[in-house]
Amino acid sequence: MGRSMAPLHGGDLRRAAALYGSREFIDFSANINLLGPPPQVLRVLAENLKDVVHYPDPHLEGLKADLGAFLEVDPPCILPGNGGAELIYLLPRLEGIRQVLVSTPTFSEYAAAAKASKVPVRYCPDFDHLRQGDMLFLCNPNNPTGRFTPKDQVLQLARKAEKQGAWLVVDEAFIDFTPEGRAASAAPLVGDFERLIVVYSLTKLFAIPGLRLGCLVAPPGLIQALGQLQPPWSVNFLAELAGRTALQDESFRERTRQATSRQREFLYQGLLAQKGLRPYPSAANFIFVAIDDPDWTGTTLTDAMGRRGILIRNCASFQGLEGDRHIRVAVRTQKENERLLAELADLLGGIR
């Protein structure tokens, strides 16, 4: 029961195969679009594989233009990168960053990026301690809790950060899955502030985490400074091609939002009915769940589900969550969600 260790991230199929034997898993541990990649993306990748013999575009002007139209910002305000994580690691390297503020629980790479740059991290439960840091990370909606911060509150926080001379970094990796969709994004506000940075990931919405593609949105001067810290050819040819193709498919984004909304509600209600579990309302494509049954922990439940071919995310590694009492599950298809709920009911003793 106790052989599983708390992972740093979900989606580790190789580790799962080593633990539970090679098999087909249903992966609820990684928060990827339940629809999978847009079909046109897969076709374009297959048709252009031969071009991997060439170097990728070092300037990415076409990608920046497409991202600018999508995010409603000017292309000079955009820095593409090898996924959101690479770009997050650039930020604490900015001059004058003496302490980073991270609310808990949230995505672990904010603190890891600060520590990699030897910048102290201060953990806080809320954003009332802005004076005590030079850079604040806000995940919106938050991972792992799914909590959404409305745009007007983000705007207030940006004003407060500007007044204090601090950077506000808003990570919008899951913003497309919210009921508001793109209307909830703070990216178009970047032109109104000198110290607002938005991180955006294309890997979640377009289900291409293996290709790695994301971008920063910030004032042009800051984009130039961060670009000098970035390795050359950070975005590979296939990632650029997939991103530019996916960004043109508006109908895919709307289908995603509708499908996620339906299945999120179905899964939430199903989890709410489970004995020993307490799900939290979510605005993202995943649901955070507290374990109230004293006979189970996040580790033992994750392990038991893994042996049944279902991967869930043990949240024990998240700073601020004590006692190994939480899991996170992605929103997947109806059939997969039904399987998850059935296996949980079997383990936990049925439904209320």
Image (cartoon, rainbow, N blue to C red):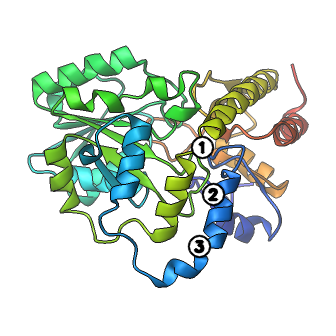
Crowd tier of the residue under label 3, counting other residues whose Cα lies within 10 Å: few below 14, some 14–19, many 20 or above: few
**Residue 68: percent from left, percent from top:** 36, 42
**Disc 3 residue type (three-letter):** Asn
Please tell me which residue is depicted at 56% across the width and 27% down the height of the picture.
Answer: 178
Please tell me which residue is depicted at 15% across the width and 26% down the height of the picture.
Answer: 162
Task: Residue lying at the far bottom in this picture: please name it.
Answer: 53
Crowd tier of the residue under label 1, counting other residues whose Cα lies within 10 Å: few below 14, some 14–19, many 20 or above: few
User: Mark 2 = which residue?
Assistant: 41
User: Mark 3 = which residue?
Assistant: 48
Q: In the rendering, which numbered label is found on residue 78?
A: none
**Residue 249: percent from left, percent from top:** 60, 43
Could you tell me which secondary element the residue under label 2 belongs to?
A: helix
Give the vertical position of 180 relative to 52 (above or below): above
Crowd tier of the residue under label 2, counting other residues whose Cα lies within 10 Å: few below 14, some 14–19, many 20 or above: many
**Disc 1 residue type (three-letter):** Asp
Q: Is residue 36 left or right of residue 232?
A: right
